[in-house]
Image (tube, rainbow, N blue to C red):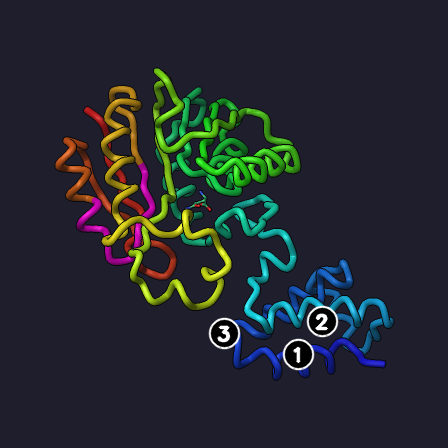
């Protein structure tokens, strides 16, 4: 029999060479196996796993040792106040993107009944967070991937969020003559030649959700151009971008005559979200 503390230490030793967050990973896998939260691991270090639990934990650990992201092994990821289903068809929601949600919430007036568009919704992370925090607003969430959109719909049901619609669309293509007070997006923005694409979790995420041409800005260019047509007067556009793309994205916004253009850092102090307004 193996107790929790011994199991954790053994698993960390195995995982250290593969993951920068070995302890956290092991604890998350163990919590999922035991269907308990972190406090249980602390309170009962001598608790012993039965054969079935041990087998299930070892299967999960093996997947992680092969590089599989924790969010895929567990099939979910916490984002904002939501628990989101995640599959290989979607990007894994990142804490960086919570910064965009925070900035959007700061802009939306308390009781506003805004129409908000989330382009490339993936799991629905941004759209569902805004919909939950702003029940008077109505969110349109798009993705070109039918599979991703299905996950986002499941996430709306799972989190009991109904002030939202889902449209399969390549950026603005299927939006007809809709108009919005705000457009938000965490589009693909990685350069196609970026060596990081062969490292860590991104290896298991859809390429279409990650890369965007030689300089990583192809989709951001399309979004900025399209937003001119789909934003109401005074409307805001919020775009997440790479840590080294702030100047380029702000310049693109200014070139399209967006006003009050500014850029905001994420919690790791990297430039991450550009905001501009339509006159
Ligand atoms: N909007 C989703 C997220 O932020 C998906 C983004 C994407 O696939 N590029 O997680």
Of badges 2 and 1, nearer the viewer stands 1
Range of residues picked out in magenta: 238-249
Q: Earlier in the sequence, mark 3 or mark 1?
A: 1
Residue 20, label in figure: 3
Q: Quadrant of ligand 1?
A: top left
Is 85 left, or right, of 256 in this rendering?
Answer: right
Residue on which the image places disc 2: 42
Q: Marks 2/1: CA distance?
A: 16 Å
SS at circle 1: helix
Eyeballing the image, is 72 above or below 260? below
Quarter the C terminus occupies: top left
**Is 170 a magenta residue?**
no
State the image coordinates of residue 16 (x, y, percent, origin top left): 55, 80
Quarter the N terminus occupies: bottom right
**Is 240 a magenta residue?**
yes
Is 171 left, or right, of 225 in this rendering?
Answer: right
State the image coordinates of residue 162 (x, y, percent, origin top left): 59, 26
Q: Marks 2/3: CA distance?
A: 21 Å
Q: Earlier in the sequence, mark 2 or mark 1?
A: 1
Residue 11, label in figure: 1
* 101 or 54, nearer to the observer: 54
Eyeballing the image, is 168 above or below 70? above
Eyeballing the image, is 198 above or below 160? below
Eyeballing the image, is 246 above or below 239? below
Number of numbered tags placed on the structure image: 3
Could you classify mark 3 by the number of other residues whose Cα lies within 10 Å: few (under 14), some (14-19), or many (20 or more)? Answer: few
């Amino acid at each position: 029999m193996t107790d929790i503390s011994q199991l954790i230490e053994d698993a960390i030793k195995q995982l250290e060479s593969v993951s920068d967050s070995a302890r956290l990973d092991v604890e998350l896998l163990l919590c999922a196996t035991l269907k308990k939260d972190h406090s249980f691991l602390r309170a009962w270090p001598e608790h012993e796993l039965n054969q079935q639990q041990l087998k299930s934990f070892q299967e999960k650990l093996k997947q992680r040792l092969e590089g599989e992201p924790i969010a895929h092994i567990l099939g979910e990821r916490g984002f904002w106040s939501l628990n989101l289903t995640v599959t290989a068809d979607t990007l894994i929601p990142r804490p960086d993107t919570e910064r965009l949600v925070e900035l959007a919430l700061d802009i939306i007036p308390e009781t506003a009944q805004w129409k908000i568009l989330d382009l490339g919704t993936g799991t629905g992370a941004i759209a569902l967070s805004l919909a939950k925090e702003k029940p008077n607003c109505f969110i349109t969430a798009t993705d070109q991937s039918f599979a991703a959109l299905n996950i986002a719909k499941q996430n709306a049901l799972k989190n009991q969020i109904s002030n939202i619609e889902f449209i399969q669309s390549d950026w603005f293509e299927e939006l007809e003559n809709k108009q919005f007070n705000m457009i938000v997006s965490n589009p693909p923005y990685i350069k196609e030649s970026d060596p990081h694409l062969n490292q860590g979790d991104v290896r298991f995420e859809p390429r279409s959700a990650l890369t965007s041409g030689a300089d990583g800005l192809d989709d951001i260019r399309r979004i900025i151009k399209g937003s001119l047509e789909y934003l109401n007067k005074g409307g805001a556009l919020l775009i997440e971008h790479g840590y080294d793309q702030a100047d380029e994205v702000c310049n693109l916004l200014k070139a399209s005559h967006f006003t009050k253009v500014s850029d905001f850092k994420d919690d790791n102090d990297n430039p991450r979200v550009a905001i501009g307004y339509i006159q």
